[in-house]
Image (spheres, grey):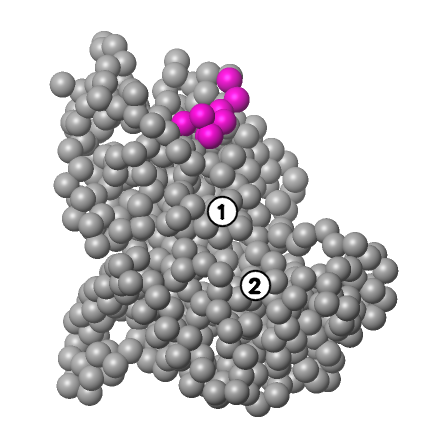
Amino acid sequence: MTTPNETARGEAEHFDVLIVGAGISGVAGAYYLRGQCPDTSFVILEAEDSFGGTWWTHRSPGIRSDSDLHTFGYGFKPWVGPPIATAEEILSYMGEVIEENDLAQYIRYRHRIATAAWSHADGLWRIEATRGETGESVVFTCNFLWMCQGYYRHNEGYTPDRPGMADYQGTIAHPENWPADLDYAGKNVVVIGSGATAATVVPAMAETAAHVTMLQRSPTFFRCGRNAIEIAETLRELQVDEAWVHEITRRKIMHDQATFTDQCFADPEEVKHQLLAQVRDLLGPDYDIDTHFTPYYLPWRQRIAFVPDGDLFKGIAAGKASVVTDHIERFTERGIRLQSGAELEADIVVTATGFNMNVMGDIAFTIDGKPLDFHDTVTYRGMMFTGVPNLAWVFGYFRASWTLRSELIAAFVCRLLNHMKATGATSVEPALRDEDKDMALFDWMEEDSFNPNYLKRALSILPRRGDKREWQHTQDYWREKDEFPAIDLEDEVFHYRRPARTDVAAE
């Protein structure tokens, strides 16, 4: 049996919209298309065997969110569990969204996209993909391409090449390529890294490992607290409807996040004092906080992970885990030798050293046969790009939930598609206005604002930004939640192509 859009074998299937990725953003896009663009045909191509993105591909111990699920969850479906949730809980929630909204019919699993080619003559994207179960090539065409695949390579973690790694006789595992049969019970483990992944893996492995050492080059900021939201608990005690609990809790969290971010930039030393005081309370006055938990950067210049119920620090205080702050000289047969001269013996080394960013899923893009380098483009609000027709990219927030921006972009894309249909436009792309032509251009993100190593490594492949808000990917949900719905679709930024018209800005 074929779907309405399927054609004979070897021919292209056509859809109005093609969504790349069935993770948080792709499922949001499908939900919004069904509700706001009911006459629009669409398909989701997903490279993996199932939905979920990060929550499907990551299998390391203790994998959990580092954003609260009241805001990481969707605005249209209340989250009723603990705010910091496991991958299993998040996948279950997403499965309910897919089932309740009949979205499974739109998802094609095991479809890995290789190329995306735009033709101005045809007014279409031509997508070539490989079908995983057969290895055959399949072709799709679409009017609009919606990139929801995330911003890093899901199956390829970043592991720096260290001297002596080939000499090491133990097991090396990266959280993004976790061996299904890895048994760490009773083993000595070294986890390299100190970010959100390490903060998750260390306490989870420490439950059964002989000992876990978190080896870090430099410290990271963490926030600690109960895995609960007080206002949600109070509203439930008052038997308030879950839809109201969800909305009120989301607004309270978003307000608090914005206030905290503002405080980080207005008075970073005070925020630093508060964050370190939380750690000191859990580890005691004699622990060397200055060496192991006092970062060289200011708060929120890198992501601050939430440690639910302080489990990482409780494991350290109990002696199940420890922290070493030093630089690696080389791997040895038995473990890792540090620049200080000490050697950490380990049966297992976990390289929680980050990930490799990509742009647009490592897909080879062309426009009219010419290779597209996204670094040559300027971003419009972090979701569209100059010179690139009929394409939107979901890149979420660093200092707030990814999903918040996914839904803002989803609503905008649907409004744009409906506007194009109503006005007879076949394509649209943002373009610098006359007043923007001499605008200074910069890398995607200002280093003084946000500077993790994974982002700095990828600046040369990311689009550029200007010195005006509309030509930037901002971190300001509190303003964007009002700005995005108010975007004037007939602003001269948007260059539409309409039949019997030249490619000029809409009047």
Left or right: 482 as drawn, with respect to 2: left
Bounds of the magenta span?
370-377
Choose between 226 and 88: the one closer to the eye. Answer: 226
Q: Mark 1 = which residue?
A: 455
At mark 2, the secondary structure is loop
Image depth: mark 2 or mark 1 in front: 2
At mark 1, the secondary structure is helix
- Work out whether residue 89 can be spotted: no
Label 1 crowd bin: few (<14), some (14–19), many (20+), radius 10 Å: some
Q: Residue at x 21, y 39 (%)?
A: 415
Q: Mark 2 = which residue?
A: 218
> Residue 89 at x, y = what percent?
43, 72
Above or below 148: residue 239: below
Quarter of the image holding residue 138?
Answer: top right
Above or below 15: residue 170: below
> Residue 279 at x, y = what percent?
45, 79
Gap in angstroms between the C-alphas marked 2 and 1: 17 Å
Chain-order first, disc 2 or disc 1: 2
> Residue 293 at x, y = what percent?
50, 72
Q: Residue 352's mark? A: none
Screen quadrant of the C terminus:
top left
Above or below 103: residue 428: above
- Work out whether residue 466 can be spotted: yes
Q: Residue at x 63, y 36 (%)?
A: 136
